[in-house]
Amino acid sequence: MSFVPPRCPRLECPFHLEPEGQFYRLRGFYRVRCRRQPIPRFQCRGCGRSFSRQTFRTDYRDRKPQTNERVLQMLCSGVGLRQIGRTVGLDIHSVQGKLRKYGRQAALLHDNLCTRLPSGRTFVLDEEETFECKSIRRLTVPMLVDNETWFLVATAVGSIRRLAVTGSRRWHDQQLEEAKVGPRPDESRQRVAEVMQALARRVGEGSLTLRSDEKALYRVLAREQFGDRVRHETTPGTDPRTADNPLFVINVTITMSRDNCGRLRRNSWLVSKKADRLRRHLGLFTVYRNYVRRRFNRDKPKESAAKLLGLLPRALTWREASRWRQDWGERSIHPMSVTGRVTVGQHDSVRSTSVAPCLPAV
Ligand SMILES: [Zn+2]
């Protein structure tokens, strides 16, 4: 199916916000070595600037775009960046570049697709601990999950300070480092508040239940963020981590993140060198967990967490999830749109008026 530009890509052009009728004219095609099909080129009738289908795609200016899908699959399969490069024939720096670019796009896609969550649901919160480069540079990774669908609502990454045992080698390293750069900042409060704000934006004025361990900070922040709308249930962190534990969902999600993101594995040389790269990687993990993977292995193949929450009619493939750029909010093209005609915002309205389990091809 041929591509239809949904708007002028220039933000300053009037046809970006309100594209009218045939706001563009076709200006031929061009060929690139990495694609068999020619790429259509257009010219805007408003601003006169030209653009092509690639302007709307995430793989715009990518080298070897045919490797993207495999790279993304492997980034969420616990494979290290160098091994991914060796397997698909890319340099390590290319894999790093794809991780940065697609990690950012994945976070935007999640924001665009999940703008609202139904009220009255139960969410589970906990923090995972890891480090960047050295084990004395600790990081906290708060995660917030829907208890029923296992939908990962939000993650964040922040530095924390953990004092090593006095006199140990790590303690000496820590002393030397702190003498140079000062004490490591503790961002636990800000990052936990960040994931709660992400949940608050999505549930609006609705009520909810929040489950967590007994850390006092969670109670304070939940009260600050949700007031009386939240019912906060706590479970001692020392309780056996079985399927009967009320925190089972978050415990498994954290374990799964260690399996899927190699950089979160303990005692591994894949460990993150920079917190920002972990943030990008978690963006990919969120999309994989919510929109690409089915919730449980026993579920039907296309039953993702997002489908169970009613956000999408089925699970996405990595090709769909990484197809269109997502930096225009609800004006971005919907990942399920083949021609580019339907945006994320329009898809929302199509979905709310349709009771059909599958949407028409758009
Ligand atoms: Zn224009």
Image (cartoon, grey):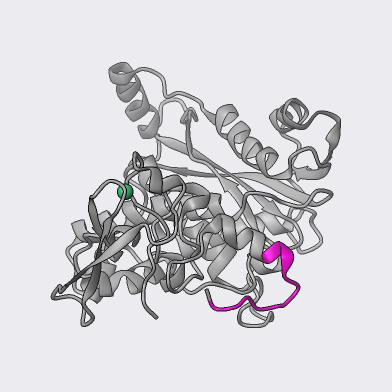
**Number of marks present in the image shown:** 0
Q: Can residue 248 be spotted in the picture?
A: yes
Residue 167 location (% of width, % of height): 41, 26
Q: Is residue 126 above or below residue 92?
A: above
Q: Residue at x 21, y 72 (%)?
A: 86
What stretch of residues is rendered in magenta?
351-361
In the picture provided, is 4 more to the left or to the right than 148? left
In the depicted structure, whether residue 73 falls above or below residue 269: below
Residue 264 seen in this snapshot: no
Confirm whether the magenta stretch covers residue 27.
no
**Which residue lies at the image location 40% right of the left edge and 55% below the top edge?**
7
**Residue placed at 82% from the left, 45% from the top?**
209
Residue drawn at x 18%, y 75% as measured from the top left: 34
Where is residue 108? Give x, y as percent.
Answer: 47, 50
User: Residue 4 appears at what percent x and percent y?
Assistant: 39, 68
> In terms of secondary structure, what is the magenta stretch mainly?
loop
Up-down relation of residue 33 to residue 205 (above or below): below
Q: Is residue 62 left or right of residue 57?
A: left
- Frontmost residue, 10 versus 300: 10
Name the quarter where the N terminus is drawn.
bottom left
Q: Going by the image, does 140 lie left or right of 41? A: right
Q: Position of residue 210 (x, y in %)?
A: 78, 43
User: Of 304 and 334, which appears nearest the observer?
Assistant: 334
Observer-nearest of 347 and 172: 347
Q: Is residue 190 left or right of residue 229?
A: left
